[in-house]
Amino acid sequence: MQAWVVDRPGPIDGGPLRRIERPLPAPGPRQVRVRVSCCGVCRTDLHLAEGDLPPHRPAMTPGHEVVGRVEAVGPGAGRFPVGERVGIAWLARTDGSCRFCRRGDENLCTSPLFTGWDVDGGYADACVVDERYAYPLPDTVSDEQAAPLLCAGIIGYRALRCAAVRPGGRLGIYGFGGSAHLTAQLALAQGMEVHVFTRGEQNRRLARELGADSVSAAAVPSPVPLDGAILFAPAGDLVPVALRALDRGATLAVAGIWLSAIPGLDYAAELFQERRLRSVTANTREDGTQFLRLAGRLGIAATTVGYPMAQAPAALADLAHGRFGGAAVLHN
Ligand SMILES: [Zn+2]
Ligand SMILES: [Zn+2]
């Protein structure tokens, strides 16, 4: 089969990915092999290709928003029959035994495996997954529409809960790409007021189309005090900007796996009055299951741009340069 691998991590325009021929992976115990239909392009893939996140293994195949059909079943696997459509997400394995797994916080597992970082992902014809970490997908959603739900959607859902805005409250969203545009729909469906701060006219247009209450440039003061905010842009210099926009006692949740340096904070203006700054780290399977059910029921729809699998590097470059609004999805 054909698979993209991160060959030499570096700037995306320098061509860090290479497409290679490798044997079809055989599913191990409790694993299934999935014939990839679509794979979403997540900013984390870009961080891995460019070396912002250090490689965990050489020649790793990225991609953790995988939609496909089960084509082979390993020993002891029985959750999904051959032919069933499944989704594969970021969390590939947890140990189930560390103090965080035992208390229900498997997103904080001390020895996790991640799809596209520790185990080969979906920028390929096929990949294998532990069936306990795969998701059934809502029937109402097409393959292309389902792909971005699997990371962008799930992480946004967790970030929204971390920002702890009550129904009807005011949510700020900083950066408006794949994850943010799904989260905004979820927040609006829960009756929140949504204020979007982002660069790029395409992103601002998409935010307006989805019904955001206000849309402005990334670093401008908020028109209203925010009851909670999520930082999706990987830009540490927006942390103080977003903290200043928070009302007393409100939380800023940082959704990304990687963030550029955060400048020094002004305690009185940016943290005092019990404002909180917290990160969002991966997700539990329960987050994924809850979000996918909600997305099906609420009709959360991703704005997608399709690319042939052969053009994975171009899709990543377009993401790096902000050349599309919404989420890119690779097709086999
Ligand atoms: Zn664990
Ligand atoms: Zn992701």
Image (cartoon, rainbow, N blue to C red):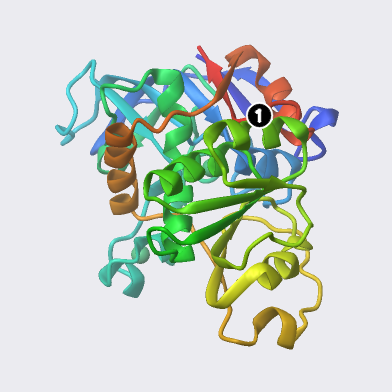
Q: Quadrant of residue 18?
A: top right
Q: Quadrant holding ligand 1?
A: bottom left
Pick the residue in front: 130 or 309.
Answer: 309
Determine whether, in the image, residue 156 is placed left or right of residue 267: left
Q: What residue is rendered at 40% in x and 50% in y? A: 191
Front residue of this view, candidates 124 and 147: 147
Does 58 appear above or below 324? below
Q: Residue furthest right?
A: 14
The answer to whether one can see residue 134 in this image is no
Whether 252 is drawn above or below 189: the answer is below
Residue 162: percent from the left, percent from the top?
45, 64
Residue designated by label 1: 325
> Residue 315: x and y, percent?
68, 23
- The 10 Å Cα crowd at callout 1, few under 14, some 14 to 19, many 20 or more, is many
In the image shown, does 165 or 90 lie closer to the viewer?
165
Residue 61 figure quarter: top right
Hey, what amino acid is under mark 1? Gly
Q: Residue at x 61, y 71 (%)?
A: 246
Mark 1 CB lies closer than 8 A to ligand 2: no
Q: Is residue 48 left or right of residue 139?
A: right
Q: Nearer the viewer, residue 243 or 313?
A: 243
Give the secondary structure at mark 1: loop
Q: Position of residue 118 (x, y in %)?
A: 51, 46
**Residue 15 percent location from the top left of the image:** 80, 27
